[in-house]
């Protein structure tokens, strides 16, 4: 029911916020190599603020909680990642209006990816979070819809795909965002946003496994 779903969302949010706080320095190091060294702080602050709203969220429908996480990110995280993460979570939360199920989770993932691509204008290969997201979302959808895998296995495969996507960002040249200002000097560095996307997916999986 909707209470169980809300609790699951809140547990996921706590795990994500905790993980991003743990990874703050690492994400900042990645962003200092090819950006402005704020990605760790941005992610920690944004998801931390959202996780702090547990009491406000206590009476909300699960889709409203997810939407509110998005708006919290938009208002607390500037730069590229705030609107991309926040706006896309907010937009995709519509898919949960009728509840959170395996089917609506696929729709959520697709809507989220579409919004990130739409807003940021990045395709695969531009060295952004899209490089982690595209393989993850496609793998998740295919695993559920074509291969009939149980959702946990589908999510685990999506995490593996995201991991390969993150590795793929290392040797390529940034075409979008701050890192693109470096031109060829961005080559050889791992993209911070793809990395935070992987961490979030890993925590969604860990939460689902609990
Ligand atoms: P900023 O670059 O404004 O300081 P962050 O450091 O928080 O913001 O986030 C940087 C990350 O945002 C990058 O590593 C990249 O993954 C992602 N990003 C930047 N621009 C785009 C874009 N146009 N499309 C998709 N992702 C992007
Ligand atoms: Mg930055
Ligand atoms: Mg910045």
Image (cartoon, rainbow, N blue to C red):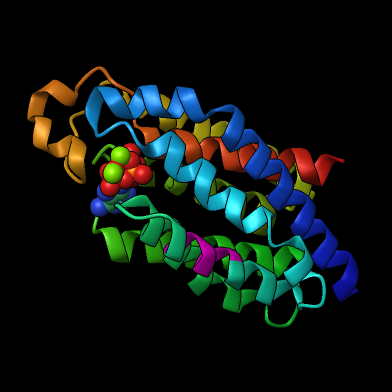
The answer to which quarter of the image holds residue 57 is bottom right
Q: How many marks?
A: 0
Quadrant field for ligand 1: top left
- Residue, x 75% and y 59% (percent of image)? 9
Q: Position of residue 10 (x, y in %)?
A: 76, 57
- Residue, x 30% and y 66% (percent of image)? 118
Q: Which residues are magenta?
A: 69-74
Q: Position of residue 139 (x, y in %)?
A: 56, 46
- Residue, x 60% and y 70% (percent of image)? 68
Magenta-span inclusion, residue 29: no
Q: Is residue 71 positioned above or below 150 on the image?
A: below
Residue with the most extreme bottom position: 98
Quarter holding the C terminus? top right
Residue 157 in view: no
Quarter holding the N terminus? bottom right
Identify which residue, 134 or 64, lies in the foreground.
64
Q: Position of residue 63 (x, y in %)?
A: 68, 74
The answer to which quarter of the image holds residue 168 is top left
């Amino acid at each position: 029911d909707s209470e169980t779903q809300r609790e699951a969302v809140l547990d996921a949010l706590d795990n994500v916020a905790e993980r991003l706080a743990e990874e703050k320095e690492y994400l900042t190091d990645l962003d200092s190599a090819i950006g402005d060294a704020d990605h760790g702080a941005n992610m920690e602050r944004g998801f931390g603020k959202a996780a702090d709203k547990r009491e406000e969220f206590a009476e909300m429908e699960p889709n409203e909680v997810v939407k509110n996480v998005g708006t919290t990110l938009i208002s607390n995280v500037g730069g590229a990642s705030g609107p991309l993460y926040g706006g896309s979570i907010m937009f995709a939360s519509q898919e949960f209006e009728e509840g959170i199920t395996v089917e609506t989770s696929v729709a959520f993932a697709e809507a989220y990816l579409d919004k990130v691509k739409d807003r940021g204008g990045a395709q695969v290969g531009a060295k952004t979070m899209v490089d982690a997201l595209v393989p993850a979302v496609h793998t998740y959808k295919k695993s559920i819809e074509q291969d009939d895998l149980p959702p946990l296995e589908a999510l685990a495969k999506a995490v593996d795909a995201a991991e390969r996507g993150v590795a793929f960002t290392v040797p390529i040249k940034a075409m979008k965002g701050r890192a693109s200002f470096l031109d060829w000097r961005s080559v050889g560095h791992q993209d911070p946003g793809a990395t935070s996307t992987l961490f979030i997916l890993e925590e969604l999986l860990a939460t689902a496994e609990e």
